[in-house]
Structure formats: structure tokens, C-alpha cells
Image: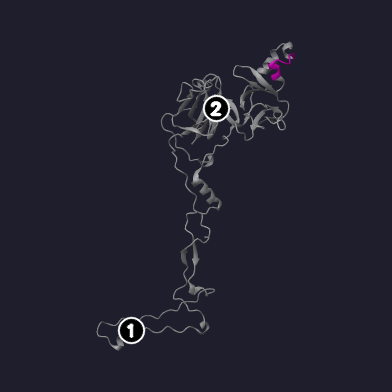
Amino acid sequence: MFPESQRPTRLPPQGPIPQEPSESELPEGVEASESEVTLTIPSGHRSDLGERERRAAALNSGTFRDPNAPRFQVVRPPNAAAIVGPLPPCPVAPAMPPVPPKGPATPAARLSTPAPPSAPPEAQGAPPLLAQPVQPIICWSNAEEPPLPLPQEEAHPYRPLARPPMALLCIFDDGQTEGEWIRLRSERVRIGRTEGDILIPHDPAIADCHAELSRVIRHGRYRWYLTDLRSPTGTFVRIGSALLRHGQELFIGSRRYRFEHPTHSAAAEWLSQASPEEVLRSEHPKRRAVQVPTLIEVFMDGREGISFELTQAVHWLGRDPNRCDLLVPDDPLLSPKHCRLYRNADGAWYLDQTQTLNGTWLRIGRMAIDSLGQFQLGEQRFLLWVL
């Protein structure tokens, strides 16, 4: 995969272009706006870049030595071992006499090679000179070789530019971070229990037609979107951090929670219209929401379980009583120190998490997934990988 800054520019799409649906075209009950959410790569998942990328990274850092490159060392001839410093100039041989004409050989016509002049007096006792300058001899050995020159930057792997990008969908096996991989090439893929392109028939918590993955054009580029299709149990995405809004549902550990914020307009409207008796009733849920932000456990039948009032600026949720003030000790899927809820200077509430095994999940209506994203329908978890 390319880094965002190095991704090649795609050519303009040809033919009908799938456009992002307007708010009026979305299914009833699905929000068109996106929450301020940061997705996180699932724990244990690794997109393997391959041997080529690792070699290129090592080459750029100057630490790479090719194990397949031939090793060599430089060796000089034995008779040049005593030569120190620059070599003396080589003697110049005299010009050869002209070749005599053909005929019987005569003493005058015989060729003779004059003897070379004697060496100068200062060269007396020096090692014999070579006819040519000493040339290094290259021989193969297992000796340590000098650093190899770094090659030029490697080219990017081929990828289509005119057609839209495909994606890979992984249906996780139970309790695993791997599973069945499906290649998505069409514009829309629906997932459900009895209807759609991908069926999960053995999960009763999945609706007949639960969610949709779609590839649309937005701001001049292709994007993949995950959309909930009015399912009663909802669609959840795994998050690293998120801005919490009134009424949003979270899946933490094995339980669902709903966040209630006092600044919500419905709570303010109820406060202006409620009778004095209702306002004074501290157990009334609307009054509780107006007083302080609250995290409430919810069940599928609408009942409420435990609740946590967020009275401090920072709260930690988990199983460890020494490190967390929001304790759920009987949830085996919850980490000892699972996630943090905090209020910023403007009074907005955020959630972020540490590197936990099971993660924190946020219920969404519609959300874009640009690279990697994990989501859950019913009790089935998926991973979408946009190539």
C-alpha cells in the first residue's frame, strides 16, 4: 500500500460514476453526518509489506548488505609486495627498424634488437621493474567486503489508475484475528442473515439485511463507506478515540453502554417543559441526564443496567480497582485498564483507549473507511482492507 503522500493520482473515471447519496436518499434512521472518530488497526493484525519494502527501507538507511552479492577482496601480485609509494616510470623501448625486402637472407638484412639502456644509478639495488603498472587482481573469497554502493530508489509496484480501487473483506473466525477473505470488486456489497451478497445465517443477532459496503466518489476520489441498514442491533466500528455525543452507544467488553450528555437539546427542552415535581424527582432519568453526564448500561430489550456518573474531568473504565474508578469486575472481556473518558476545556467529552485485546466499539449510522477498519454486526466481526 502507498503512503497517502505517495499514492499515484488516479485518472478521471469513465462512464457512470457512483455518487455519494444525499441525506434524503439514505435509509430511514441512518445519519448522514460522520462523527469525529479515529479508527484503530486491530490488535494482532499486520499488513505485510513484503521483503522488497524491507530491503528498500534498509537501503535508504544505509544498513543493508545484500547476502546474495559476490564477496571479493583486492590482492596484489607477489613481486609488487616490496614496492612502496608511486611506481617508477616504465622504460621506453626504441623504435623497430623497417622490415627488409623479401629475398635471400644476408647478414646486413638480419634483424637485431638493441639492448635496453641500463637502469640509472639511483635505481641500483631496487626491485626489478615491471613492464606494466601493477594491476589489482580480483579474486573471490569469504573475506569481509567493502560497503556496496546504494542502488537508486526502487519503483513502486504496479497498481491500476483508471479503474476504482478494490477492497478485501475478512470474516473473522471465532476468537481469531484471521478468517475467510473475500475480494470486493462491485460497487455495493450487502451483508445479512438471510438477504444480501454475504450471508451469516447462524447469527440471530444479525438482521436479515444488516449493513452495506459501498464505493462512491467524494471530493474527486473513491472512498469505501460502511452503512447500517436500520438494523435493530446496530453496526459498530472499532475505534481508537471518539468525540462522544448524547445518545451514542458503545460496546465495551461484553456490554453495551449509552452516553447521555446534559447539553443535549432534548434534555434542555424537557427541563423547560417539565413540572416542578418532575424536576425535583432525582430518580427521573431526564433529570439525571440534565444534572451530570452519565454512562448507562443498556440491554437489547430496552432495560437499563449499571450506570456511571461522570463527575470528574477524567475517568478510567476497567476491572482493576487500583487503576480505574469505573469498575466492572465481572466482565471477562474487559481489560484491567480498558479505556479513558475525559472532558476537554470546552466541556466536550471524549473516549480513547489503550492497546487492549478486545477494543472499544462505537455504534455508527454511516462511516468512511479509507485504509483499514474493523466492524461488528451481531456477534460477527469483520475487517475491511482498502487496497
The kind of residue on which mark 2 rests is Gln
Indicate left or right for 251 with 148 as reference.
Answer: right
What colour scheme governs how the chains and residues are painted in the rendered image of this protein?
Answer: one colour
Q: Residue at x 50, y 65 (%)?
A: 74
Provide residue 183's location: percent of width, then percent of height: 45, 33
Q: Residue at x 73, y 14 (%)?
A: 279
Q: Report the residue marked by disc 2.
A: 376
Q: Residue at x 56, y 37 (%)?
A: 44
Q: Report the residue marked by disc 1.
A: 111
Q: Residues within 10 Å of mark 2 (few under 14, many from 20)?
A: many
Residue 105 sits above or below residue 286 on the image: below
The kind of residue on which mark 1 rests is Leu
Provide residue 311's location: percent of width, then percent of height: 73, 25
- Whether the magenta-drawn stretch holds residue 286 is answered as yes
Mark 2 → mark 1, Cα distance in angstroms: 101 Å
Residue 255 at least partly seen:
yes
- The stretch of residues the image draws in magenta is 280-289
